[in-house]
Image (cartoon, grey):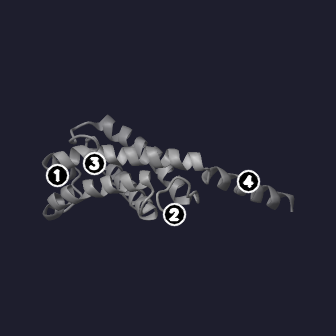
């Protein structure tokens, strides 16, 4: 009986931390700014971004250019929606999905021996260290996006 009470109490305390309004707002700002910042160069220079996508050798050539045009706008809109708090749940799903896809893409590139940086904030180049650094960065980022997905905080959203 005592062990069950301790586990329940710990679970409630953990949920209280996850639901913290300030932590959730910090996560919203951090993730939103990262996605907005990552989208800027891609929107300005879709040709370089399409080359970055091609370097991963994961996407069929027919859709690389379409992806290079659409993905940055999804990143930008998701980042803005997170910060402002409009279409919030959809934005949280989008950033979680994109972050998981980024982790998978980087992991497979490293596993296949493709020496590349992620191409997130500039055009991808050859660099094995940058791939590992980007992968670690994405794992930290996924912690924030998971917190956003689990948080029940609705404070400071434009629309509740």
The label shown at residue 10 is: 4
Q: Is residue 7 left or right of residue 29?
A: right
Mark 3–mark 1 distance (CA, rounded to whole Å): 13 Å
Q: Position of residue 85 (x, y in %)?
A: 45, 56
* Residue at which label 3 appears: 39
- Cα distance in 3D space between marks 2 and 1: 37 Å
Q: Real-space Cα distance between discs 4 and 2?
A: 28 Å
What SS does tag 1 mark? Answer: helix
The crowd level at tag 4 (other Cα within 10 Å; few <14, some 14-19, many 20+) is: few
> For the point 67% across and 53% down, which residue is it?
16
Q: Residue furthest right?
A: 1
Local secondary structure at mark 3? helix
Please name whichever residue, 136 or 25, is drawn nearer the observer in this view of the structure.
Answer: 25
Q: For the residues carrying marks 3 and 1, which lies nearer the camera in this image?
A: 3
Res. 65 image quadrant: bottom left
Judge depth for marks 4 and 2 and give the one in front.
Answer: 2
The numbered mark, 2 or 3, whose residue comes first in the sequence reads 3
């Amino acid at each position: 009986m005592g062990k069950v009470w301790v586990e329940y109490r710990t679970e409630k305390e953990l949920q209280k931390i996850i639901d913290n309004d300030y932590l959730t707002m910090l996560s919203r700002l951090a993730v939103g700014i990262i996605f907005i910042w990552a989208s800027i160069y891609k929107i300005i220079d879709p040709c370089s971004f399409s080359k970055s996508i091609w370097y991963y050798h994961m996407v069929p050539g027919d859709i690389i250019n379409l992806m290079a045009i659409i993905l940055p706008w999804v990143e930008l809109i998701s980042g803005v929606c997170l910060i402002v708090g409009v279409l919030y749940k959809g934005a949280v799903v989008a950033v979680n999905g994109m972050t998981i896809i980024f982790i998978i893409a980087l992991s497979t590139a490293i596993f296949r021996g493709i020496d590349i940086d992620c191409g997130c904030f500039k055009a991808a180049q050859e660099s094995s260290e940058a791939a590992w650094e980007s992968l670690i960065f994405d794992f930290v980022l996924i912690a924030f996006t998971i917190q956003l997905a689990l948080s029940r905080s609705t404070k400071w959203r434009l629309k509740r």
